[in-house]
């Protein structure tokens, strides 16, 4: 079993865990039909069945399975309201500066 991520046109992505053979088949099919439209590929993953229109695929990543997919993210920490306000102020300032720069 391998983890996969499929990036689609428009910025969306699909991810999960599937048999390595199915994912290699997906990759090979994607390489062959990259320039044709409306070519589909279907495979089963741990969540169910995935059917992808290969003309919508931008990239495919196949990686080793990880038991904890939150590795590298601190999911236990709480964001304080002061941090949110500070971040919002900084975002507003940068947005305002960018808009002023565009007017020049």
Image: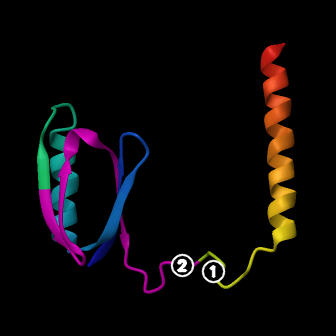
Q: In which quadrant of the rendered image does the C terminus lie?
A: top right
Q: Position of residue 1 (x, y in %)?
A: 26, 79
Q: Residue at x 15, y 32 (%)?
A: 36
The residues tagged by marks 2 and 1 sit, at their Cα atoms, a distance apart of 7 Å
Q: Residue at x 78, y 19 (%)?
A: 102
Discs 2/1, front: 1
Q: Nearer the viewer, residue 11 or 1?
A: 11
Main SS of residues in magenta: strand
Where 58 sits versus 14, above or below? Answer: above
Counting every numbered tag in the picture gives 2
Q: Write the start and end of the magenta stretch as one range.
A: 42-71
Q: Considering only order in the chain, which callout, 1 or 2, is on the residue closer to the N terminus?
A: 2
Tag 2's secondary structure?
A: loop
Q: Position of residue 4 (x, y in %)?
A: 33, 65
Q: Is 54 in the magenta?
A: yes
Residue 74 sits in quarter = bottom right
Tag 1's secondary structure?
A: loop
Which mark, residue 103? none
Where 54 sits versus 82, above or below? Answer: above
Q: Nearer the viewer, residue 46 or 60?
A: 46
Q: Residues within 10 Å of mark 1 (few under 14, many from 20)?
A: few
Q: Position of residue 72 (x, y in %)?
A: 61, 75
Can residue 5 be seen here? The reply is no
Q: Are marks 2 and 1 in contact (CB under 8 Å)?
A: yes
Can residue 54 be seen here? The reply is yes
Q: Which residue is mark 1?
A: 75
Q: Position of residue 19 (x, y in %)?
A: 20, 74
Q: Which residue is mark 2?
A: 70
Q: Residue at x 48, y 78 (%)?
A: 69
């Amino acid at each position: 079993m391998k983890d996969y991520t499929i990036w689609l046109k428009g910025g969306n992505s699909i991810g999960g865990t599937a048999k390595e053979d199915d994912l290699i088949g997906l990759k090979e099919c994607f390489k062959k039909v990259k320039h044709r439209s409306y070519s589909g590929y279907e495979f089963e993953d741990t969540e169910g069945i995935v059917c992808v229109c290969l003309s919508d695929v931008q990239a495919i990543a196949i990686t080793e399975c990880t038991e904890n997919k939150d590795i590298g993210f601190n999911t236990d920490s709480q964001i304080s309201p002061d941090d949110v306000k500070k971040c919002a102020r900084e975002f507003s300032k940068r947005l305002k500066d960018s808009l002023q720069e565009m007017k020049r």
